[in-house]
Image (cartoon, rainbow, N blue to C red):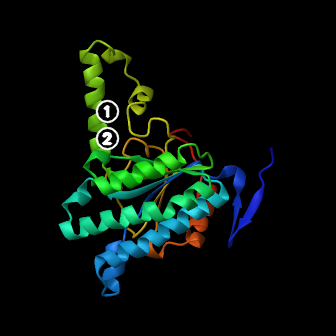
Protein backbone atom coordinates (compact mmCIF):
# COMPACT_ATOMS: atom_id res chain seq x y z
CA UNK A 1 0.00 0.00 0.00
CA UNK A 2 1.30 3.47 -0.87
CA UNK A 3 2.00 5.87 1.98
CA UNK A 4 -0.39 8.80 2.05
CA UNK A 5 0.81 12.13 3.39
CA UNK A 6 -1.70 14.15 5.37
CA UNK A 7 -1.48 17.85 6.14
CA UNK A 8 -2.38 18.52 9.77
CA UNK A 9 -1.88 22.05 11.03
CA UNK A 10 1.48 23.32 9.78
CA UNK A 11 3.05 19.86 9.43
CA UNK A 12 2.73 17.20 6.74
CA UNK A 13 2.63 13.68 8.16
CA UNK A 14 2.63 10.23 6.63
CA UNK A 15 -0.44 8.82 8.30
CA UNK A 16 0.64 5.26 7.50
CA UNK A 17 3.79 5.63 9.60
CA UNK A 18 2.62 7.28 12.78
CA UNK A 19 3.71 5.84 16.14
CA UNK A 20 1.02 3.64 17.64
CA UNK A 21 2.05 4.69 21.15
CA UNK A 22 3.50 8.00 22.34
CA UNK A 23 4.72 8.43 25.92
CA UNK A 24 5.45 11.89 27.30
CA UNK A 25 7.38 13.08 30.35
CA UNK A 26 5.62 16.38 31.00
CA UNK A 27 8.38 18.38 32.68
CA UNK A 28 8.89 22.06 33.38
CA UNK A 29 5.71 23.33 35.03
CA UNK A 30 7.59 24.67 38.05
CA UNK A 31 10.28 26.37 35.99
CA UNK A 32 7.64 27.91 33.73
CA UNK A 33 6.01 29.49 36.78
CA UNK A 34 9.32 30.57 38.33
CA UNK A 35 10.35 32.40 35.14
CA UNK A 36 7.15 34.41 35.45
CA UNK A 37 7.46 34.97 39.22
CA UNK A 38 4.34 32.88 39.76
CA UNK A 39 3.44 30.19 42.26
CA UNK A 40 4.40 26.68 41.06
CA UNK A 41 0.73 25.71 41.10
CA UNK A 42 0.10 28.23 38.32
CA UNK A 43 2.56 26.28 36.22
CA UNK A 44 0.65 23.06 36.84
CA UNK A 45 -2.61 24.78 35.94
CA UNK A 46 -1.13 26.01 32.66
CA UNK A 47 0.33 22.54 32.09
CA UNK A 48 -3.15 20.99 32.27
CA UNK A 49 -4.11 23.09 29.24
CA UNK A 50 -1.16 21.62 27.33
CA UNK A 51 -2.47 18.15 28.25
CA UNK A 52 -5.81 18.99 26.69
CA UNK A 53 -4.09 20.27 23.53
CA UNK A 54 -1.92 17.17 23.12
CA UNK A 55 -4.76 14.72 23.78
CA UNK A 56 -6.93 16.44 21.18
CA UNK A 57 -4.12 16.47 18.62
CA UNK A 58 -3.26 12.79 19.13
CA UNK A 59 -6.90 11.79 18.76
CA UNK A 60 -7.26 13.94 15.65
CA UNK A 61 -4.31 12.43 13.79
CA UNK A 62 -4.95 8.83 14.86
CA UNK A 63 -2.50 7.99 17.66
CA UNK A 64 -3.83 4.83 19.30
CA UNK A 65 -2.12 5.06 22.72
CA UNK A 66 -0.92 8.13 24.63
CA UNK A 67 0.76 7.75 28.03
CA UNK A 68 1.35 10.87 30.13
CA UNK A 69 3.71 10.86 33.12
CA UNK A 70 1.54 12.94 35.42
CA UNK A 71 2.83 12.14 38.94
CA UNK A 72 5.77 9.95 39.94
CA UNK A 73 6.41 7.96 43.09
CA UNK A 74 9.19 10.47 43.83
CA UNK A 75 6.75 13.39 43.54
CA UNK A 76 5.26 12.40 46.90
CA UNK A 77 8.41 13.94 48.42
CA UNK A 78 7.42 17.43 47.27
CA UNK A 79 5.98 19.92 49.80
CA UNK A 80 2.59 18.80 51.06
CA UNK A 81 0.97 22.02 49.90
CA UNK A 82 2.07 21.42 46.33
CA UNK A 83 1.07 17.74 46.38
CA UNK A 84 -2.37 18.60 47.77
CA UNK A 85 -2.86 21.28 45.13
CA UNK A 86 -1.82 18.82 42.39
CA UNK A 87 -4.36 16.29 43.62
CA UNK A 88 -7.13 18.91 43.59
CA UNK A 89 -6.10 19.98 40.10
CA UNK A 90 -6.05 16.37 38.91
CA UNK A 91 -9.54 15.74 40.32
CA UNK A 92 -10.91 18.86 38.62
CA UNK A 93 -9.25 17.90 35.35
CA UNK A 94 -10.80 14.42 35.37
CA UNK A 95 -14.21 15.87 36.11
CA UNK A 96 -13.98 18.60 33.49
CA UNK A 97 -12.70 16.33 30.71
CA UNK A 98 -15.16 13.47 31.16
CA UNK A 99 -17.62 14.63 28.52
CA UNK A 100 -14.89 15.39 25.98
CA UNK A 101 -13.34 11.95 26.46
CA UNK A 102 -16.71 10.30 25.91
CA UNK A 103 -17.55 12.46 22.87
CA UNK A 104 -14.16 11.77 21.28
CA UNK A 105 -14.25 7.99 21.87
CA UNK A 106 -11.24 8.05 24.25
CA UNK A 107 -10.77 5.45 26.97
CA UNK A 108 -9.03 6.59 30.16
CA UNK A 109 -6.67 4.18 31.90
CA UNK A 110 -4.23 4.56 34.78
CA UNK A 111 -0.95 2.88 35.75
CA UNK A 112 0.90 3.20 39.04
CA UNK A 113 0.34 2.81 42.76
CA UNK A 114 -3.24 4.03 42.58
CA UNK A 115 -3.94 3.00 46.17
CA UNK A 116 -1.65 5.84 47.36
CA UNK A 117 -3.83 8.50 45.73
CA UNK A 118 -6.40 10.41 47.81
CA UNK A 119 -9.93 9.02 47.76
CA UNK A 120 -11.21 12.04 45.78
CA UNK A 121 -8.76 11.31 42.98
CA UNK A 122 -9.50 7.57 43.01
CA UNK A 123 -13.23 8.26 42.86
CA UNK A 124 -12.82 10.65 39.91
CA UNK A 125 -10.60 8.12 38.14
CA UNK A 126 -13.05 5.29 38.69
CA UNK A 127 -15.98 7.36 37.44
CA UNK A 128 -14.14 8.49 34.31
CA UNK A 129 -12.71 5.05 33.54
CA UNK A 130 -16.14 3.45 33.98
CA UNK A 131 -17.74 5.99 31.66
CA UNK A 132 -15.08 5.48 28.96
CA UNK A 133 -14.33 1.76 29.31
CA UNK A 134 -15.95 0.85 25.98
CA UNK A 135 -14.37 3.66 23.95
CA UNK A 136 -12.18 2.49 21.10
CA UNK A 137 -10.71 5.56 19.39
CA UNK A 138 -7.71 6.09 21.65
CA UNK A 139 -6.39 4.97 25.01
CA UNK A 140 -5.24 7.82 27.26
CA UNK A 141 -3.04 6.31 29.97
CA UNK A 142 -2.17 8.44 33.00
CA UNK A 143 0.93 7.37 34.94
CA UNK A 144 -0.03 8.41 38.48
CA UNK A 145 2.03 7.62 41.56
CA UNK A 146 4.09 5.73 39.01
CA UNK A 147 7.70 4.58 39.16
CA UNK A 148 9.44 2.24 36.76
CA UNK A 149 11.50 0.56 39.47
CA UNK A 150 8.45 0.07 41.68
CA UNK A 151 6.64 -1.50 38.72
CA UNK A 152 9.52 -3.92 38.14
CA UNK A 153 9.72 -4.80 41.85
CA UNK A 154 5.99 -5.59 41.84
CA UNK A 155 6.46 -7.77 38.78
CA UNK A 156 9.34 -9.67 40.44
CA UNK A 157 7.32 -10.18 43.62
CA UNK A 158 4.36 -11.52 41.63
CA UNK A 159 6.49 -13.97 39.65
CA UNK A 160 8.40 -15.01 42.79
CA UNK A 161 5.09 -15.81 44.48
CA UNK A 162 3.99 -17.89 41.49
CA UNK A 163 7.29 -19.79 41.57
CA UNK A 164 6.88 -20.38 45.30
CA UNK A 165 3.40 -21.81 44.73
CA UNK A 166 4.63 -24.02 41.91
CA UNK A 167 2.70 -22.17 39.22
CA UNK A 168 5.79 -21.06 37.28
CA UNK A 169 9.17 -22.70 36.72
CA UNK A 170 12.08 -20.21 36.89
CA UNK A 171 13.55 -21.43 33.61
CA UNK A 172 10.21 -20.82 31.87
CA UNK A 173 10.32 -17.07 32.50
CA UNK A 174 10.62 -15.12 29.25
CA UNK A 175 10.67 -11.46 28.28
CA UNK A 176 7.06 -11.88 27.18
CA UNK A 177 6.11 -13.26 30.59
CA UNK A 178 7.82 -10.35 32.32
CA UNK A 179 5.93 -7.87 30.12
CA UNK A 180 2.69 -9.68 30.92
CA UNK A 181 3.18 -8.92 34.63
CA UNK A 182 3.75 -5.17 34.27
CA UNK A 183 1.10 -2.44 34.61
CA UNK A 184 1.17 -2.12 30.81
CA UNK A 185 0.54 -5.82 30.12
CA UNK A 186 -1.99 -5.18 27.35
CA UNK A 187 -0.49 -1.96 26.00
CA UNK A 188 2.18 -1.97 23.27
CA UNK A 189 5.57 -0.48 24.14
CA UNK A 190 5.96 3.20 23.21
CA UNK A 191 7.28 3.85 19.73
CA UNK A 192 8.18 7.40 20.71
CA UNK A 193 9.01 8.96 24.05
CA UNK A 194 9.05 12.75 24.36
CA UNK A 195 10.54 14.70 27.24
CA UNK A 196 9.99 18.41 27.64
CA UNK A 197 12.17 20.96 29.51
CA UNK A 198 15.49 19.78 28.05
CA UNK A 199 16.47 17.41 30.85
CA UNK A 200 18.49 14.48 29.46
CA UNK A 201 17.13 11.68 31.62
CA UNK A 202 14.16 9.32 31.72
CA UNK A 203 13.28 9.83 35.40
CA UNK A 204 12.20 6.29 36.26
CA UNK A 205 9.58 6.22 33.49
CA UNK A 206 8.62 2.97 31.73
CA UNK A 207 12.08 1.50 32.25
CA UNK A 208 11.27 -1.85 30.67
CA UNK A 209 8.91 -0.58 27.98
CA UNK A 210 11.12 2.07 26.34
CA UNK A 211 13.99 -0.31 25.52
CA UNK A 212 13.60 0.40 21.80
CA UNK A 213 11.58 3.62 21.85
CA UNK A 214 12.70 6.58 19.79
CA UNK A 215 13.49 9.44 22.18
CA UNK A 216 13.02 13.14 21.54
CA UNK A 217 14.02 15.78 24.11
CA UNK A 218 12.79 19.33 23.60
CA UNK A 219 13.88 22.40 25.61
CA UNK A 220 10.28 23.61 25.62
CA UNK A 221 8.74 23.73 29.08
CA UNK A 222 5.58 21.64 29.27
CA UNK A 223 3.08 24.55 29.63
CA UNK A 224 4.43 25.97 26.34
CA UNK A 225 4.27 22.66 24.47
CA UNK A 226 1.99 23.07 21.46
CA UNK A 227 0.25 21.10 18.75
CA UNK A 228 2.68 22.48 16.15
CA UNK A 229 5.69 21.24 18.13
CA UNK A 230 4.16 17.80 18.55
CA UNK A 231 3.59 17.59 14.80
CA UNK A 232 7.18 18.67 14.13
CA UNK A 233 8.45 15.95 16.48
CA UNK A 234 6.33 13.41 14.63
CA UNK A 235 7.90 14.56 11.37
CA UNK A 236 11.32 13.97 12.91
CA UNK A 237 10.20 10.52 14.08
CA UNK A 238 9.14 9.62 10.54
CA UNK A 239 12.60 10.47 9.23
CA UNK A 240 14.29 8.04 11.62
CA UNK A 241 15.15 4.44 10.80
CA UNK A 242 14.14 2.02 13.54
CA UNK A 243 16.43 -1.02 13.57
CA UNK A 244 15.62 -2.62 16.98
CA UNK A 245 19.23 -3.69 17.43
CA UNK A 246 19.64 -4.91 13.85
CA UNK A 247 21.81 -3.56 11.06
Query: In x, y percent, where is residue 112?
Result: 34, 46
Q: What residue is disc 2 on?
A: 151
Q: In the image, is 234 to the left or to the right of 109?
A: right
Q: Tell me the CA gap for discs 1 and 2.
A: 6 Å
Quarter assignment of residue 43:
bottom left
Inspect this view and state whether residue 193 appears. Answer: yes
SS state under label 2: helix
Horizontal placement of 1 versus 61: left or right?
A: right
Residue furthest out toward the right: 2
Q: Where in the figure is residue 98, as x and y percent of width and height?
A: 51, 59
Residue 130 got which mark? Answer: none
Q: Nearer the viewer, residue 25 or 51?
A: 51
Instruction: Locate residue 203, reporting x and y percent.
Output: 32, 56
Residue nearer the viewer, 14 or 8: 8
Label 1 secondary element: helix
Residue wearing tag 1: 155
Amino acid sequence: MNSSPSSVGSAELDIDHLPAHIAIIMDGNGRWAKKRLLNRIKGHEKGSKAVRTVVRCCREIGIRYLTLYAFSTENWQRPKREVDALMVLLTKFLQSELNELVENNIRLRVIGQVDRLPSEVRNALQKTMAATKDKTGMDLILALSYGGRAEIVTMVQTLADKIKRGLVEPESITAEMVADHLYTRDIPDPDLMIRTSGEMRISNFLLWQIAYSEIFVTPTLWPDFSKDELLQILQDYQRRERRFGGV
